Amino acid sequence: MARRYAATIATPHGPRKCFEARIERSGRKPLVARFGGIPRRRNKDAAITDSVLVPGTIRHRELITRLLANRCEICKADGGISVHHVRRLADLTRPGRPQPAWAELMARRRRKTLVVCRNCHDSIHTGQPKPQFTQ
C-alpha cells in the first residue's frame, strides 16, 4: 500500500513542499514519486529559440501539371476534365481478371489518378469500352 504525505525537497530556488507517494519494498529501495516542488515563477530571462521554417516542398507536381494541361489523357479532348482515382495500385493489378485499357494504363504508369474528360470518366464507371489509350 502506498503511503502519501507532503514532503519538503531542496530546489535551486529554496525548499519547496510537494506531494510524495512512497511504496516500501522488502530488500529493495522504496518506490518514490514526487509531484510538485516546481516554482510557479516567471523566468524573465528565458531565451526563446524559435526554429526557422523551411519552405515546404510541393508534392504531386506531376498531377498539377497534368491538371493544368486541361486535356483528357484518353481521348485528348480539351476542357471539362475531372480526375479518376483508385484507392490502391494493387487494385489495378489483380491476377486472373482481364483489366480494361484504362486500368492497364494506370498500372503501367504506376499512377493512382487519371485526368479524363466527363465522357471518358462516365464510360470508365459504367464499364463501356473506349478506343485505345494513347501514351
Image (cartoon, rainbow, N blue to C red):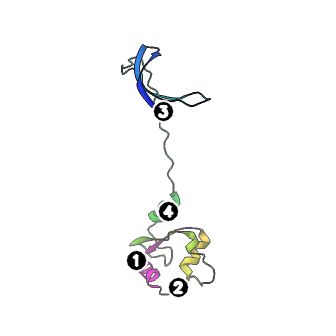
x 51%, y 58%: residue: 60
Q: Which residue does the numbered mark 1 point to in the structure image?
A: 118
x 48%, y 42%: residue: 55
User: Vertically, is 109 above or below 99?
Assistant: above
Which portion, as a residue range, is magenta? 114-131
Q: Which residue does the numbered mark 3 point to in the structure image?
A: 51
Select label 1 or label 3 by which is in front.
3
Q: Are marks 2 and 4 in contact (CB under 8 Å)?
A: no
119 falls in the magenta region: yes
Quick one: which residue is furthest to the left in this view?
A: 41
Q: Can residue 38 be seen from the camera position used here?
A: no
Of the two numbered discs 1 and 3 on the same chain, state the one appearing first in sequence: 3
x 50%, y 39%: residue: 54
Q: Which residue does the numbered mark 2 point to in the structure image?
A: 131
Q: Which residue does the numbered mark 4 point to in the structure image?
A: 63
Q: Looking at the rendering, which quadrant does residue 79 occupy?
A: bottom left
